[in-house]
């Protein structure tokens, strides 16, 4: 299985600032990569697929980038509602695998 | 807008069978080329894809679980189901049903999840 490693594990950022979350895959996954947001007590919500395509209804301040083994989720103009755990997922190699998450706290 | 809702027992005894159902509303489970998935989340393993069923009834399972898992469709009830045999404490998790509309195995709609605890 492809191992997906997320960093940092936790981060705390002030409102209005930006945040950069990273994922590394243990082997190339091309651009078959997704990001999810999960708030307490809720299911994950798809944010980004195909490494950089925003899912329906996702604000433009969420931007995904990267390919092969290195991927980044950049969130600009952070709002209190962005406080959540963010997961990444590779779906190039079967079975699909997820990272363990980055907890983003808005100060 | 499609909605998914998991249901089933929240407590299962070790060595017994876990059975969950996902009811799909707001759309037919038969429409489009959708894959219907089960994903679980535990503190130890994080998010773990369990398996999926296509509208044709064909299935794919995570290899490490394949000997114990069955996923099936009931189109008459607009539902799909998960059974997991011979459960242990390691199967304790929140179980989500989720839809994949692309076939690429990313998930654009999720149920709210159901906590299943394996304990005597």
Image (cartoon, coloured by chain):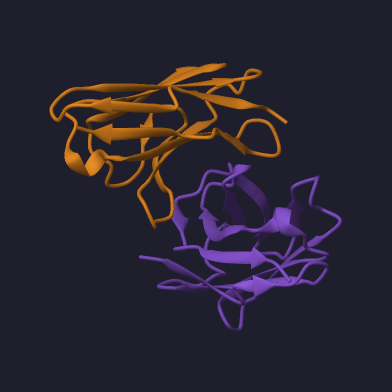
Name the residue at the right extreme: B67
- Count of numbered marks: 0
| Residue at image location 80% in from the left, 45% down from the top | B63
B84 with respect to A17 (left or right) = right
Q: Is residue B20 visible?
A: no
Q: Nearer the viewer, residue A60 or B91?
A: B91
Name the spot of residue A5 as percent of width and height, x first. 56, 24
Q: Nearer the viewer, residue A83 or A71?
A: A83
Name the spot of residue A30 as percent of width and height, x first. 57, 21
Q: Is residue B77 visible?
A: yes
Does B91 sit above or below residue A54? Answer: below
Q: Nearer the viewer, residue A18 or B75?
A: A18
Does A107 sit above or below residue B29? Answer: above
Q: Which chain is orange?
A: A
| Residue at image location 65% in from the left, 19% down from the top | A26
Q: Nearer the viewer, residue B31 or A9?
A: A9
Q: Quadrant of residue B36?
A: bottom right
Name the residue at the bottom extreme: B76
| Residue at image location 53% in from the left, 57% down from the top | B98
Name the residue at the front extreme: B120
Q: Which chain is purple?
A: B
Name the spot of residue B120 as percent of width and height, x first. 73, 71
A25 with respect to A34 (left or right) = right
Q: Quadrant of the N terminus of chain A?
A: top right
Name the spot of residue B115 as percent of width and height, x first. 55, 64
Q: Quadrant of the C terminus of chain A?
A: top left
Q: Quadrant of residue A60?
A: top left
Does A57 sit above or below residue A30? Answer: below
Q: Quadrant of residue B72?
A: bottom right
């Amino acid at each position: 299985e492809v191992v997906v490693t997320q960093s940092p594990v936790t981060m705390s950022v002030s409102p209005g600032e930006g945040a950069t979350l990273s994922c590394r895959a243990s082997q190339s996954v091309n651009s078959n990569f997704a990001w999810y947001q999960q708030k307490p007590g809720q299911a994950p919500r798809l944010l980004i697929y195909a490494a950089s395509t925003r899912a329906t209804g996702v604000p433009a301040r969420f931007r995904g980038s990267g390919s092969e083994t290195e991927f980044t989720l950049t969130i600009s103009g952070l709002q209190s509602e962005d406080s959540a755990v963010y997961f990444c997922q590779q779906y190039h190699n079967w079975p699909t695998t997820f990272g363990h998450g980055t907890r983003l706290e808005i100060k | 807008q499609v909605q998914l809702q998991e249901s089933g027992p929240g407590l299962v005894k070790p060595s017994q069978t876990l059975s969950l159902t996902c009811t799909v509303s707001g759309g037919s489970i038969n429409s489009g080329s959708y894959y219907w998935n089960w994903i679980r989340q535990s503190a130890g393993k994080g998010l773990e894809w369990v398996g999926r069923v296509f509208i044709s009834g064909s299935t794919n399972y995570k290899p490490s679980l394949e000997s114990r898992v069955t996923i099936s469709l009931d189109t008459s009830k607009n539902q799909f189901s998960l059974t997991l045999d011979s459960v242990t404490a390691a199967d304790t998790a929140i179980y989500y049903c989720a839809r994949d509309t692309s076939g690429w195995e990313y998930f654009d709609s999720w149920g709210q999840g159901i906590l299943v605890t394996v304990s005597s």
